[in-house]
């Protein structure tokens, strides 16, 4: 039985965390002995881990005393290496941003794999020096394989690091489509009206999600008496700012629902999914909307190993025409033009991942 290590931060609410659990659920635990190492053993998805996954914690010190912090963390690194150095057949760093996860993955096997879930070139405002600082610190070129969830993030990073192109591949996340369909059936206490519902699901963080743009659209819709409602599901550092804007502007067409472990009834109830992000890797919520047959309105044109949004699953817009698209769609009822066979797609993706883990 091959031994696989996967390192991540925690299993709290989030697209990366949900996709990690789906990956673990689709791994053959009769074939692989899987150890999941978390910086913090916490989060709502812990109870969803499949039986048989070994759970460990690698928690670094955050002491304000720099000498104590460095001593403790050095001791932890030495201890990890003594007991885990190249012990596994493959090791995966699933949380790109986490230095400790990268250390755990790079030291635990010869077959080192890095997942990249976001487009860091866009996240750093196309500042190549900042991108290089980030990935040089994380020792990008020491990984044997790099898995991207979107073609765009792969293309942008390979332009900066040409030597990684021959070991890079686009494989989007495993999707538990049956679970999404089942959970979407849960009733929510919402009264429908004739107004079209435009739903945002995600982290309330202006630096990436740019919800002020969505609130501006809501304001214009109110001023022009357009029959549109804007639902916001999620939480984050800028939640209060967004609520204050909605309150001050008296946006009675905006509703905040907070963070939901099960957002699927809201997706099922809406007419359109809407994202106003500055950048994304490939949002998990895209696949969730496609499964529930909701067209997507997005400011980010990203594609993965199968799905691209324009024409097939929705509309790519920019800051200037997003209001016009909302206005147009508020008077029509549309569905996605195509369905995806996620069962076949999941099997194909797992085969690719297994080939990488077994270094074939």
Image (tube, helix red, strand yellow):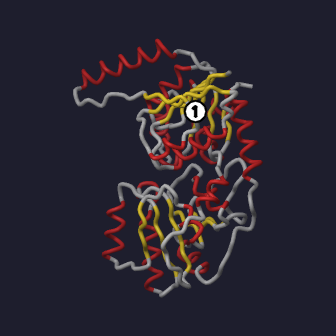
Place of residue 149 in the rendered image (x, y in percent of width and height, measured from the top left)? 62, 45
Place of residue 304 in the rendered image (x, y in percent of width and height, measured from the top left)? 67, 49
Residue projecting furthest to the bottom: 225
Residue 196, quarter of the rendered image: bottom right
Residue projecting furthest to the left: 65
Place of residue 112 in the rendered image (x, y in percent of width and height, measured from the top left)? 59, 25
Instruction: Tell me the residue at 63%/54% (across/down).
Output: 179
Instruction: Tell me the residue at 73%/30% (across/down).
Output: 355
Instruction: Tell me the residue at 56%/64% (across/down).
Output: 186
In front of the other: 8 or 140: 8
In front of the other: 35 or 79: 35
Place of residue 101 in the rendered image (x, y in percent of width and height, measured from the top left)? 47, 30
Tell me the crowding category of disc 1: few under 14, some 14 to 19, or many 20 or more residues within 10 angstroms, Cα based. Answer: many
Residue projecting furthest to the top: 82
Name the quarter where the N terminus is drawn.
top right
In front of the other: 225 or 43: 43
Residue 182, quarter of the rendered image: bottom right
Secondary element at tag 1: strand
Q: Is residue 256 above or below residue 350?
A: below
Q: Which residue is mark 1?
A: 114
Q: How many numbered callouts? A: 1
Q: Is residue 129 visible?
A: yes
Instruction: Tell me the residue at 56%/76% (across/down).
Output: 326
Q: Is residue 301 visible?
A: no
Residue 279 falls left or right of residue 167: left
């Amino acid at each position: 039985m091959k031994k696989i290590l996967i390192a991540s931060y925690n299993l709290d609410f989030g697209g990366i965390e949900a996709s990690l659990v789906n990956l673990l659920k689709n791994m053959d635990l009769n074939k692989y002995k899987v150890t999941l190492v978390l910086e913090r053993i916490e989060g709502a998805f812990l109870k969803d881990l499949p039986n048989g996954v070994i759970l460990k914690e690698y928690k670094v010190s955050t002491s304000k005393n720099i000498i104590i912090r460095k001593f403790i963390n050095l001791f932890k690194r030495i201890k990890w290496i003594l007991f885990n150095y190249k012990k596994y057949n493959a090791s995966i760093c699933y949380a790109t941003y986490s230095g400790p996860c990268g250390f755990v993955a790079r030291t635990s096997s010869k077959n080192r794999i890095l997942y990249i879930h976001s487009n860091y070139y866009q996240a750093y405002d196309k500042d190549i020096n900042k991108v290089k600082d980030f990935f040089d610190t994380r020792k990008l070129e020491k990984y044997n394989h790099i898995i991207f969830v979107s073609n765009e993030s792969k293309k942008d990073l390979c332009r900066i690091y040409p030597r990684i192109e021959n070991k890079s591949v686009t494989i989007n996340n495993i999707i538990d489509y049956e679970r999404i369909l089942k959970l979407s059936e849960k009733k929510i206490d919402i009264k429908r009206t004739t107004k079209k519902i435009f739903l945002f699901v995600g982290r309330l963080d202006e630096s990436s999600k740019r919800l002020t743009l969505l609130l501006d659209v809501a304001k214009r819709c109110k001023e022009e008496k357009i029959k549109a409602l804007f639902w916001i599901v999620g939480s984050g550092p800028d939640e209060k700012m967004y609520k204050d804007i909605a309150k001050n502007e008296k946006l009675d067409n905006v509703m905040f629902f907070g963070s939901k472990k099960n957002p699927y009834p809201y997706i099922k109830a809406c007419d359109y999914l809407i994202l106003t992000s500055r950048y994304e890797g490939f949002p998990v919520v895209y696949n969730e909307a496609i499964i529930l047959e909701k067209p997507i309105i997005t400011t980010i044109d990203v594609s993965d190993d199968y799905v691209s949004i324009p024409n097939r699953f929705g509309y790519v817009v920019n800051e200037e025409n997003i209001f016009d698209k909302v206005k147009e769609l508020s008077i029509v009822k549309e569905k996605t033009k195509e369905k995806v066979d996620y069962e076949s797609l999941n099997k194909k993706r797992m085969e690719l991942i297994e080939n990488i883990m077994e270094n074939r």
